[in-house]
Image (cartoon, rainbow, N blue to C red):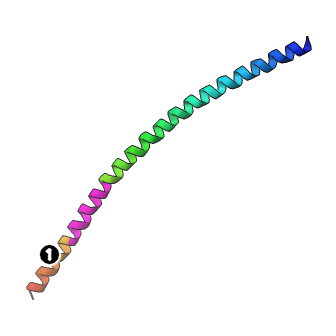
Amino acid sequence: MAQSESLNVALKALEKIAKHEKECGERWAEALTELKNIKTATNNHAARWEKMAWLVIGTVITTGATAAAISLFNT
């Protein structure tokens, strides 16, 4: 009787472990999907900000070149 009782306890424990592993696997899959979505969104935003940075740099350089040219030709 003690052997069958311990066997039942072990089987219940294995069922709980299997259920826990299944739930953790599902949560991990959801988290992985979210991380991939965040990575995609971050890359899109980075590309946008890079374009904006080049626009600002180009404007500053053009403004500086124009101001230098005006100061050279006005003297």
* Front one among 46 and 59: 46
| Residue 26 in magenta stretch | no
Numbered disc 1: secondary structure: helix
Residue 59 location (% of width, % of height):
20, 66
Q: Is residue 15 left or right of residue 55?
A: right
The image quadrant where one finds the N terminus is: top right
Residue plotted at (16% across, 80% down): 68
Who is closer to the viewer here, 4 or 27? Answer: 4
Q: In this view, does 59 lie above or below 38?
A: below
- Crowd class of label 1 (few under 14; some 14 to 19; many from 20; radius 10 Å): few
**Residue 22 in the image: x percent, y percent?**
61, 26
Q: Residue furthest top?
A: 1
At x 32%, y 53%, the residue is 47
Depicted 29 relative to depicted 46: above or below: above
Q: Where is residue 61? Give x, y as percent.
A: 22, 72
Q: In which quarter of the image is residue 75?
A: bottom left
Name the side, left or right, on which 10 lies relative to 72: right
Asked where in the image residue 63 lies, by quadrant, the reply is: bottom left
- The residue where tag 1 is placed is 66
